[in-house]
Image (cartoon, helix red, strand yellow):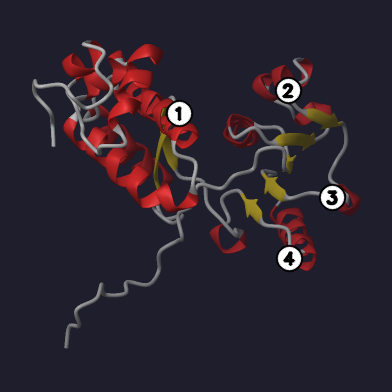
């Protein structure tokens, strides 16, 4: 018998936007897979240490090291490398060593991803589309990474070319709004007003917003009205404008 609530479909993963800024991430290995992992965590502003013999480095990882984008330890992994680490990404061609690394991480309660060994992963890397602040991840829960990449490309091909820029402008407007109405009790009203802006303005309008436009637009927040961009540029923040509103 079906109830009034969503049905449970087990076997999935909890997909999160994991904030690792300034966290210590250990990458074990220096080949192609390690190179991809390094890009992922550097893009998230993590502090990355790579442990691998220099003979095992590919050109990209060697470049990251030479540019001092990561710290580097020129040797094989040692258990002491886990001290003070927040996350481990292992990408070595040695199943026995990989399993040992995972067991050590479990003992120390460090989340770990062992490349190509789904049972020894606390989390997976999906296929990610990135456009400025926009990130979309497709995961097959370890079943088909190549298929995830195909699905991700199909999704990306349907997105407007300016959506990343529009999202960036919305982020700026939200931060400005918080300064105008910082009180905690304003939270629901802030969310409702921003939702109206996002639903009723076009992406082109959002992309065209200047800082001056935003400052004028914020004048419409108190009365709770949503003007057109044309109304904003007439410079009447009091809400007294007689022209079109999007309400």
The reply to whether the C-beta atoms of the residues labelled 3 and 1 are less than 8 Å apart is no
Cα separation, mark 3 vs mark 1, equals: 37 Å
Q: Which residue is mark 2?
A: 69
Of label 4 and label 1, which has the lower sequence position? Answer: 4
Mark with earlier residue (2, 3): 2
Which marked residue is nearer to the observer: mark 4 or mark 1?
Answer: 1
In which image quadrant can residue 15 be found?
Answer: bottom left
Which class describes the residues within 10 Å of circle 1: few (<14), some (14-19), or many (20+)?
some
Density class for disc 3 (Cα within 10 Å; few <14, some 14-19, many ≥20) is few
Residue 28, image x and y in percent?
74, 42
CB-based contact (under 8 Å), mark 4 and mark 1: no
Q: Of 55 and 13, which appears nearest the observer?
A: 13
Q: Which residue is found at the position 20% from the left and 83% from the top? A: 3
Quarter of the image where the N terminus is located: bottom left
Camera-nearest residue between 66 and 171 = 171
Q: Position of residue 196 (x, y in %)?
A: 23, 39
Between the residue at mark 2 and the residue at mark 3, the CA separation in whole angstroms equals 19 Å
The residue drawn where x is 13% and y is 31% is 246
* Residue to which mark 3 is pinned: 84
Residue at mark 2 to residue at mark 4: CA–CA distance = 28 Å
Q: Are marks 2 and 3 in contact (CB under 8 Å)?
A: no
- Helix, strand or loop status at disc 1: helix
Q: CA distance from mark 4 to mark 3?
A: 14 Å
Identify residue for label 1. Answer: 176
Q: Position of residue 122 (x, y in %)?
A: 60, 60
The disc label shown at residue 106, or none: 4
Q: Residues within 10 Å of mark 2 (few under 14, many from 20)?
A: some
């Amino acid at each position: 018998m079906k109830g009034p609530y969503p049905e449970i479909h087990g076997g999935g993963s909890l997909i999160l936007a994991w904030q690792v800024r300034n966290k210590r991430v250990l990458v074990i290995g220096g080949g192609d897979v390690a190179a991809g992992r390094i890009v992922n965590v550097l893009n998230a502003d993590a502090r990355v240490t790579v442990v691998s013999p220099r003979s095992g480095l590919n050109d990209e990882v060697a470049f990251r090291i030479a540019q001092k984008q990561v710290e580097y330890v020129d040797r094989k992994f040692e258990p002491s490398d886990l001290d003070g680490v927040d996350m481990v990404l292992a990408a070595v061609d040695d199943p026995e060593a990989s399993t040992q690394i995972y067991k050590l991480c479990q003992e120390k309660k460090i989340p770990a991803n062992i490349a190509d060994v789904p049972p020894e992963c606390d989390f997976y890397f999906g296929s990610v589309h990135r456009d400025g602040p926009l990130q979309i991840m497709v995961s097959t829960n370890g079943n088909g990474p190549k298929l995830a990449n195909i699905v991700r490309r199909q999704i990306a091909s349907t997105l407007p070319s300016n959506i990343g820029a529009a999202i960036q402008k919305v982020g700026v407007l939200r931060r400005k709004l918080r300064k105008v109405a910082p009180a905690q009790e304003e939270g629901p009203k802030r969310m409702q007003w921003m939702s109206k802006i996002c639903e009723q303005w076009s992406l082109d309008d959002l992309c065209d917003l200047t800082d001056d436009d935003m400052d004028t637009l914020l004048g419409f927040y108190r009365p709770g009205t949503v003007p057109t961009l044309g109304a904003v540029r007439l410079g009447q923040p009091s809400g007294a404008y007689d022209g079109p509103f999007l309400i």
